[in-house]
Amino acid sequence: MENFTDYTVLYDAQNSELFESSVKASLDESWAIIAFESVDMLTLPKDSQVLLWLPDSALYALIPYAVEHNWSVGFLPHPDLKRFYRSFPLPKNIEEALADIKETQTAVLSDLLYCNGHLVLSSVMLGNSAMMTSASNMDNSLWCKFKYLVSMTFNLSKVSLSPYTLQTEKGTIVNTAALGVTFVYRPKSSDFTRYLVSETEVDKATLNTFVLAPRSISEVVRFLLSRLFTGKRSSQGLADYIGHMQTRTIHVVSAQPITFTVDSEPYTDDAIDVVIEADALKVISQALPTKVVSEEVKESIRISSLPKGQAVKELINRPLPWIHHLDHEEVKETFVNLKENAQTSESFLVLMVLATLLATVGLFANSAPVIIGAMILAPLMAPIISLSMGVLRQNIDLITTATKTLLVGVLLALFFGVLLTLITPLQAVTSEIAARLSPTILDMAVAIISGIAGAYANARSEVAKSLAGVAIAVALVPPLAVSGIGIGWLDWHTFSEAFLLFITNLVGIVLAATLTFLFMGFSPFHLARKGLLIALGFVVVVSVPLFLSFAKLVDKQQIISKLEGLNVDSIELRDVQIKQQKPLYVSATLLSNQNIDNNQLDEVKKQIEAQLNREIQLESKIAILR
């Protein structure tokens, strides 16, 4: 605008004193200042150039009036002008605002957002608006965040989704269930949406619709934590419980009257129409983003993760489950893959034989690399994970098929382990064999962790390459190979201890994988309960000897810790080993700078017994230090 005196300045008479102090001092004395108390008093002609110094509350009536009369409007910072800046990023400093207006040659056409005829300066929200905004509106203190999290946690049991049907301008219909829906022009217009997607440097005549649809309390918790601790937009895109649509208009209906807010003002209606009116208002400013001029606006619909079909019926108007239950289509692909893995195929038989032979050779050769190779070859993990899915969903066919394949694999391993043992003239218990003869509760922990990893890798194709690492961790075939060696040697202790390790791995994996599939939503709890209880029962039974063995291990380590380095009359105990615990058989090297006679040996034994408070058998090696 070339001549600033062409403007008519419009202000609220009720705030005239504040206006005088903050604005009038910056105005040229030749400007005309028109005071008014209501829109009805306005007598400015159409096509006027007007400056507004008004609060948000006055703009809801004034802006539509300005559009109707084709005014070119400039906005001056007002103490109560807050929501306006959400959709109009104009200067908030009076000097900067005046300079911006002076430098503007041509008014910019700006889009306006309306909901059921109401002007929207910030956002429209329906559903649980408190859940979406409270966290962002509070201060950043840890105490405030903690109080918010606690208050929301107590309300989690009451959280439920409501059904909505959304129809875009081009006829795309979305039937879903949501905790809340937010409509904004610019993403930063709402505290809920400002961190979800990046702000563009250009304006498009499009409406941004964000649908919050967590399917479980765990996802609600994830959302709450993201509200508390996210300070900027995530580079990983939208969370899988949020949908995003860009279009010019949205029509929303529901099975019941819709309660919604327009800039926090509550309304109730049978349907909602949220509309972008393109190029509606002439704004005197250069600060607005560049406007993209296009006759046709392309719609962007990102709703693949939202509830649909049967999932909507299961979620609406009832408390959310603790974990998300996948619908039939989401389960189908994983279920089909696991059903194939449960089959007794030719490749399974061949790999089982080769893995057993390789493991047995590695055990006799005391070679860890060879045994690791056998672990990678072993195909036993596949039917065990399939068995876990069968237990979870109480699918008798899958349980039967996986169990048959598992039994065939076990029998093959035992047979070829025995066969190779009989033709191998070796009877020594190597360290690799001995390592499989003392299973403890720690081995159960390994099995449980491996079961979680195996189930997750099978359910997520992008991490399936990690299955080799899972196979190495759990080591299913080596214990079976040692069991075969025990049968070949007719050694019950070797067979029973190694087979206990295999059973430990088996039941631990089944329980852990079943729980993992449950938490990933592959089955509702009421269907999985029976199978979980059975698996848990097996784990408890197997854990009894494991706890006893672990107690022995702890006792052994404590004895070694007490005796290692013990000094008795200038005789030091080194390399202490416990070869037997009932009766206690202690082996140690006695280090001295002179010969040790029988009396001294008796004194060492006596001191050890006093230290341990029990009788022992002592096996000693004498080392003379010179």
Image (cartoon, rainbow, N blue to C red):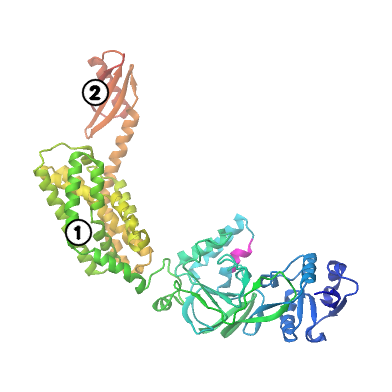
Question: In the image, residue 249 lies at what x, y percent?
Answer: 57, 82
When asked about the image quadrant of residue 493, the answer is top left
Mark pair 1, 2: CA separation: 51 Å
Q: Nearer the viewer, residue 188 or 39?
A: 188
Task: Name the foreground residue: 412 vs 256.
Answer: 412
Q: Which residue is mark 2?
A: 620
Magenta-colored segment: predominant secondary structure: helix
Q: Position of residue 239 (x, y in %)?
A: 49, 66
The reply to whether dot 1 and dot 2 touch (C-beta < 8 Å) is no
The quadrant of the picture occupied by the C terminus is top left
Would residue 221 appear left or right of 519 to someone viewing this image?
right
Which of the labelled discs sits on residue 290, or is there none? none
Residue drawn at 20 percent across, 42 percent down: 363
Label 1: element kind: helix
- Residue under pointer 1: 348
**10 Å crowding of disc 1: few (<14), some (14-19), many (20+):** many
Amino acid type at circle 1 is: Phe
Q: Is residue 176 left or right of residue 251?
A: left
Nearer the observer, disc 1 or disc 2?
A: 1
- What kind of residue is marked 2? Ser
Query: Within the magenta stretch, is there residue 548?
Result: no
Q: Residues within 10 Å of mark 2 (few under 14, many from 20)?
A: some
Q: Is residue 53 left or right of residue 198?
A: right
Q: Eyeballing the image, is 486 above or below 610?
A: below
The residue at 74%/66% (across/down) is 92
Q: Which residues are the magenta region?
A: 133-138
Confirm whether residue 203 shows in the render. Answer: yes
Give percent across and percent down for residue 166.
Answer: 51, 81
For the N terminus, give its image quadrant: bottom right
46 left or right, relative to 117? right
In the image, residue 542 above or below residue 525: above
